Amino acid sequence: MNKKVIYLLFYCLATGFCLPAQEVDKCGHDLLLEQSLERDPAVADRMAAVEAFTQAWLADDANLAAQSREIITIPVVVHVLWNEASEDISNLQIYSQIGILNEDFRMRNENVGDIPDDFKSLAVDVGFEFCLATLTPEGDITDGITRTQTEWPCIGDFNTTTESGIPRLFYSILGGKDAWDPRRYLNIWVAPTCNAFLGFGFNPGQSVASQEDGVVIDTDYFGNVCNDGRNHHLGRTTTHEIGHYFNLKHIWGTKGCGEEDDDDFVEDTPRQDNFHNGCPTHPSVSCGSADMYMNFMDYTDDACISMFTIGQRNRMLAAISGPRAGLLNSNRCLFINRPRPDLGITVFPNPVDDCIHVEFNANFDNDVTVLLYDAAGKLIYEAINNASNIRSIPAKDLATGVYYLHLTNGSTKVSERVMVY
Ligand SMILES: [Zn+2]
């Protein structure tokens, strides 16, 4: 089975010089499943047990009724592995990815309006939010990011292994980076895959060892800062792989229309023969019905995918209630680094070590008074800031602790807690 995504766009440099189109697997999920089964045949039993749990959980309406009302915060640690200095990606690139996840899993993505009318009623707010962990497994304050230089230039490709086939990526002693407790964190390794694929995510039970459980994303496809005109530049590879992490299959199943095994085990996604490339036009028909090529679990270009379905959300809720339940009570995100549409601001990062950035949305206009107080109520910083600009407040010399940011703009007054470490 050949699941190549063919880049129809060429890389065109400013000079007008175009490099040849590349052929890259978008997602290594299916390939890695074959590898996992080779390394450990027990993977099949574990995944079958997860599926049995999932079906039983979904069959009880009370489970869904209880779970689907809550917003669930997923603690994330991002492990940056780099060989070339340019692969040591910026915090801003990482924050952009967290922001994209918080849009896509909350149905706040701006292209949600592109969903065709016949699928609109199926699109859903999954109710998951993501935050960079604020506490390490040992309980120390962290920004939720680790950075590791490695001697292995393609360490994310899953072929960079020991002679016995252990992927180096997941082990510090082998030149990679150890996971943080995979029961309590979603581990995301951002590493060069040298075009092996854009990313992959393990279904619950799929990884051979718990230390290898999580999501891997190629350095160039994490976040949307490296917008180079390619097709998967909007951070939705990570949305797709986290879908796998919460037990979603590809929307076309394995391939074909007829067999039970060809399905994705989701009732409200139409049966689909194969994946899509590029940006199709609705309706794109296979297996006798219009394909939901705009689903995050297809291979369609980032700009043209926009939805999870109710059935997919329900499978993800089953995962967070069973095999991924350790994330629910891990308390690894005391402060949540996310946009606050209710406040009209975004404060990032939070916690912070060198610089607090405050971005204002349309609730604010003209001059905003920005005040920062320490926990004892002492004024630390004061500025007037035009709402169209991001305000950056130096925090490098501040003592570790909680601070309170107060913003006033006419009759609008908001405040937000900030952790400095
Ligand atoms: Zn996939």
Image (cartoon, grey):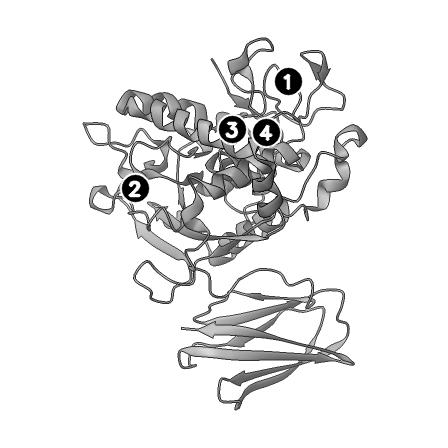
Q: Position of residue 403 (x, y in %)?
A: 51, 79
Cβ–Cβ below 8 Å for labels 4 and 1?
no
Left or right: residue 377 versus residue 271 is left
Q: Secondary structure at mark 1?
A: loop
For disc 2, the marked residue is: 211
Q: Callout 3: 10 Å neighbours few (<14), some, many (20+)?
A: few
Quadrant position of residue 205: top left
Q: Secondary structure at mark 2?
A: helix
Q: Mark 1 or mark 3, which is nearer to you? A: 3
Counting residues from the start of the chain, the first of labels 2 and 3 encountered is: 3
Q: Mark 4 or mark 3, which is nearer to you? A: 3
For disc 4, the marked residue is: 10
Distance from label 2 to label 3 (Cα)? 26 Å
Q: Secondary structure at mark 3?
A: helix
Image position of 415 with respect to 258: above or below? below
Counting residues from the start of the chain, the first of labels 4 and 1 encountered is: 4
Left or right: residue 68 versus residue 400 is right
Counting residues from the start of the chain, the first of labels 1 and 3 encountered is: 3
Left or right: residue 223 versus residue 322 is right
Left or right: residue 78 versus residue 233 is left
For disc 1, the marked residue is: 271
Which of the labelled discs sits on residue 55, or is there none? 3
